[in-house]
Image: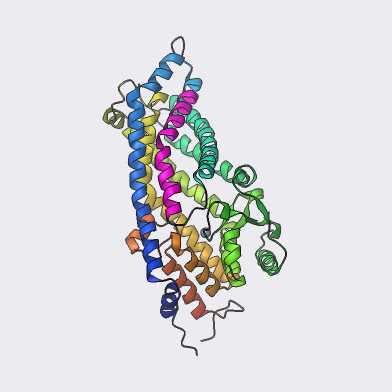
Amino acid sequence: MTTFDPAAATAAYLAQLSPEAHEKALHYTQGGHWLLLWGTLIGVLVSFIIIRTGILTGVRKWLESKKPRPWLTSLLVTLVYLTISWVLTLPWALYSEWWRERAYGLNNQTWGDWLGEAGVSAAISVVAMTVFFAVLYALVRRAPKTWWIWSSGVATLGIITLIVLAPVYIEPLFNTYTDVPAGPVREAIVKLAKENGVPSDKVYVYNGSKQSDRYTANVSGLFGTARVAISDAMLKKASLAEVRGVVGHEMGHYVHMHSLWMAAAYSLVFAFEFWLIHVLFNPAARLLGAKDVKGLADPSGLPVVLALLSVIGLLMSPVTNSITRVAETDADIFSLEHAHEPDGMAIALVRTIEYRAATPSRIEEILFYDHPSVSARIRRCMDWKAAHDPDSGKPAAK
Ligand SMILES: [Zn+2]
């Protein structure tokens, strides 16, 4: 019998990065936790400022001076709010999403490129949110007591629709997706795909290095549009074993339809969050000084709703992170069982430490990490390696 020690092997992988590199990753990751808090406070502050200008109640009074026009009012009020709020939070977004990322060597864009893409994303989310809030306000008018249940259903359907449409209509606005070029990497991916019932023409490479050299791959879409995409930044560095390990992980998301399961879990999160808004709207409106707002059904109270949502979203993030973490763990297990590349996975994971510090405490992992920590993931790979035959993937003979 060999004397392979999973704990020592895990430590050896983590030691491939210098202490300085680990230290830098720690600063980046823990600084990112604080950004969540500042981002929420800024969101609340922006809501407060917009309420105090009275601009939204002004829009509502102007539109409804002769007769009630509930649909038009909710559409226009939402549009005005989201536009002003985007502009007011732009300096913060520029700092947290561009300048800071660049300072850590995690963004390759000029500020102009970044701003162009931020504008496109904002346009998409403003359209989606405006439609969503128009429907939400209609539900509040129709079903003042149970709107939060119906709204959760609408939000979930909306998210599933966006997931289905993303690879076809949204992602091509930001990156170019092409077939993996012919060669050993493509052959390995096609073989892995065939073994796991994934259509092999559903694996793409995209020019992720346009935005960042992050070593990453993802799965997007659902039903007919589902696909796996590998960043060119990853493909450039990765060995065949790494590609098999990482693509095996993404295929796990694909085969187990994690996005659908996660949308189902989110429907419960949404119902709870909307219920909290139902209960907390009036006290929050008083707190923020929204005197001219005539209750939850009045669209000019949208800043109150969104301020509540941003605070509730922050408090719920351990739950939403945990939902994702469960799916990520499942995808890791799928990769080990189907690609049998514990070392390939481990090398790939070491490369992600620069944007996800490797050894958080258990509590930090639960609160802030949407993937299990790299140390835990490598340890799982090494435990699997100790217990299995690497070629067949069958449990090793004792
Ligand atoms: Zn994943």
Residue found farthest to the right: 182
Residue 191 location, x and y as percent?
69, 68
Residue 6 location, x and y as percent?
44, 79
Residue found farthest to the bottom: 1
Residue found farthest to the top: 66
| Helix, strand or loop: magenta stretch | helix
Q: Is residue 267 left or right of residue 206?
A: left
Looking at the rendering, which quadrant does residue 230 occupy?
Answer: bottom right
Find out whether residue 265 is within the magenta segment. Answer: no
Q: Residue 2: in sight, yes or no? A: yes
Q: Is residue 21 above or below residue 107?
A: below
Residue 214 location, x and y as percent?
51, 58
Looking at the picture, tell me which residue is in the foreground, 344 or 278: 344
Q: Is residue 14 left or right of residue 315?
A: right
Q: Which residues are magenta?
A: 74-103
Q: Residue 298: in sight, yes or no? A: no
Residue 21 location, x and y as percent?
41, 66
Count the numbered circles shown: 0
- The residue positioned 61% from the left and 79% from the top of the image is 391
Q: Is residue 244 left or right of residue 398?
A: right
Q: How is the image coloured?
A: rainbow
- The residue positioned 34% from the left and 59% from the top of the image is 364
Q: Is residue 79 above or below residue 99?
A: above
